[in-house]
Image (spheres, helix red, strand yellow):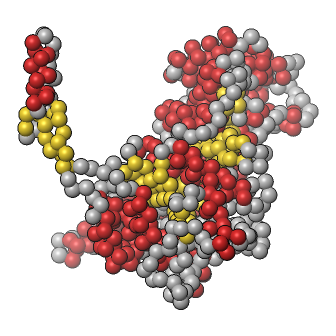
Amino acid sequence: MNSPLPCPPAEDSAAHLADEQRSLALFAEGIAGRYHHIRSVEDLPDGQGGLAHQNASHDAGALYLPESIDWFQSRDLNAAAYRLTALYQLGFREFGTYRFDIGMARDRIAALGLREPPAAHRESDIAIFFAHFEVPELARRLFHVIEMARVRAAVVRRYPGADRYRRALLDVRLDAEQAYSDGIAGEVERLEAALEGLPVASAFALHAGAVADEDADVYDSAAAVTACMDSLEFYPEGSDESAPNEGPQLEWLQRQTRLEDWDEDLADLDAKLLSLAVAEALEEGEAVAGEADRPGDLRDTDADLTAERDALKRRIDMERSTLARTLGEQREDARSFLYDEWDCHSQRYLHGWCRLFEERLHTDANALGGRDPDELLAAVRPLAHAVRRRFEQIRPSGYRRQAKVSDGDELDLDSIVAARSDLRVGVSPDERVYSRRERLRRDVGAVFLVDLSASTDDVLEEPSAGGSARGLPSLEEPSQEEAEAPASAPSDPQDLRDPYFDEDEEWDFEARRLEDAERRRIIDIQREAVLTMSGALEAIGDQYGIYGFSGYGRDCVEFFVAKELGQAYDRNVLEALAAMTPKRSTRMGPAIRHAVRKLEAAGTALKVLMIVSDGFPQDCDYGPERGEHEYGVQDTAKALREAEAAGIETFCVTVDRSGHDYLRRMCPEDRYMVIEESHQLPEALEKAYRQLTRL
């Protein structure tokens, strides 16, 4: 991104997670075949820290890595350490740690089969394995270290470059003991030192190395743990409290993997039920025609499978809820990005301060606050034709002659002369000696960024007596009275237009929607406006994307995709637009920076960013004090200046009548519009877009 973000000092050899996050996410996706969020170890759920805060940890959807690594004198080596650490973490899933099955373990490990199996409730199989021993925490720590040795050996065999990388890193590092403590190697040696003098130490040394064999699997690690625990003649007092916590426990990680298996089982049951329903329908049709008797056993099978499917679904729902409470929300369908934020108080960027989650809008017609796609299409039809016709007037209809092409309607004289000259001097000529007429094309990429904050659920007021139903507000400066008026501030400093800012008060969107069913809301106008613009831009061939943004807090900025740049307009896009609903707060800065990134990737000659909002930037922590407005305004202004520096034309449209108070500080004077009546929004967008894209 071409923006005025400061670079780290040259003398800083440390690698920072905020800088490496994007490349690490691509690296992890290439290795694992699925996306992983790259997060700081400081984001680990409560109680899951411990040694992981010095090294790394992971769960089913994220890799937790240190905020920075400064183990080496070179920044490149420190960045390589990030990749190597991530590769080791991914190895746990790739090499079967979480596919551990307690039944298989008891069959393969004779000593384990002799122990009385513990009572199992909803624990994972790994937790049941640890419960076979008198000191489960010691067994858990032994398993972690031995399994880590197995996985790392498997990683080196599968990815030979990893071992060369590891050796190169260790050769550079002078203090090997410190390298061990930083998590590059040495977990086995560290635990041996901790167990020195205990009967388990000799057994540990004997069995830990065997798991590095090529054919070793997770059950060999479990066998080594069992042998170690059986060798103990006594258990050190307090050993179950003394072992440190090493990140999210293996038990929980295996429960995540087990949940994935249950999801596959549920899909299989659904497929079987569908197949039975088809078979039953066919046989009933034959019975009606007198060709066969009506099926009897099919109905019984169908009932049994339905009961099994319902029971499994309840189990999945309960397990997913438990995992969410313990490990935090898993955004499996989203990708995450880190963005800087401008701190106007200290006049500096906060590096990697905001985490933005990008996800597709869920096209569920029954979603609260959503709208039926066909109703939305019908609502814009009266206006869409007129807007489309006006846009077609700016579509270029002329032609230009393109020279030096291999196939055309005329020979190009200059090209022929150049080819003959090349032949005379013995040079191979350029065979592109034709020219042809080509229709001129617009090369425009536009992004519509729609505010989906909770306040867009507000019901529209009736048009004022002096308001014009069709006229557009002027783009001139506000009156002197408006300019001298103090910036408005909400009466309640905690009113951040977020329905979840107070746990004691919850907004019931469905009740409010039913109550105001006969009245239109701001979100309705926004959806209709961008849909109208979609039809117009389809007519002139401009690339465009439609995105919504909301969120709550710097760690949860939400960026919703309705239509990507370059994506064809189809029924899915219409349903996504209809699914735009009021959500949470309005943290504009990171949303703008992410939209800029989208536009830069499009590569069009002219880039346009249009923001549609109903209020000023605000969030629960958008500034050092809750309810502060200036911090958010200044960060948004900085993000808009970054966009302009990247060659992007920006424009803000708001239906907030007090918008002049803050927009004049955020935007150039001719790059924003405050409309008095929300029904003017479609025409306002049209006028602004036509002005921005005159080529």
Classify 491 as above or below 137. below
Asked whether 34 or 409 is in front, the reply is 409
Q: How many numbered marks appear?
A: 0
Asked whether 467 or 536 is in front, the reply is 467
Tell me residue 530's x, y (percent).
43, 66
Image quadrant where residue 377 sits = bottom left
Tell me residue 85's x, y (percent).
63, 27
Image quadrant where residue 103 sits = top right
Residue 194 placement, left or right of 447: right
Q: Which residue lies furthest to the right in this view?
A: 237
- In this orientation, does residue 631 appear? yes
Image quadrant where residue 16 sits = top right
Q: Which residue lies furthest to the front in this view?
A: 480
Tell me residue 132's x, y (percent).
74, 38
Q: Which residue lies furthest to the bottom in this view?
A: 465
Classify 135 as above or below 425. below
Residue 65 placement, left or right of 29: right
Residue 620 placement, left or right of 260: right
Classify 385 as above or below 336. below
Tell me residue 597's x, y (percent).
50, 45
Q: Which residue is drawn at 76% across and 31% down?
A: 54
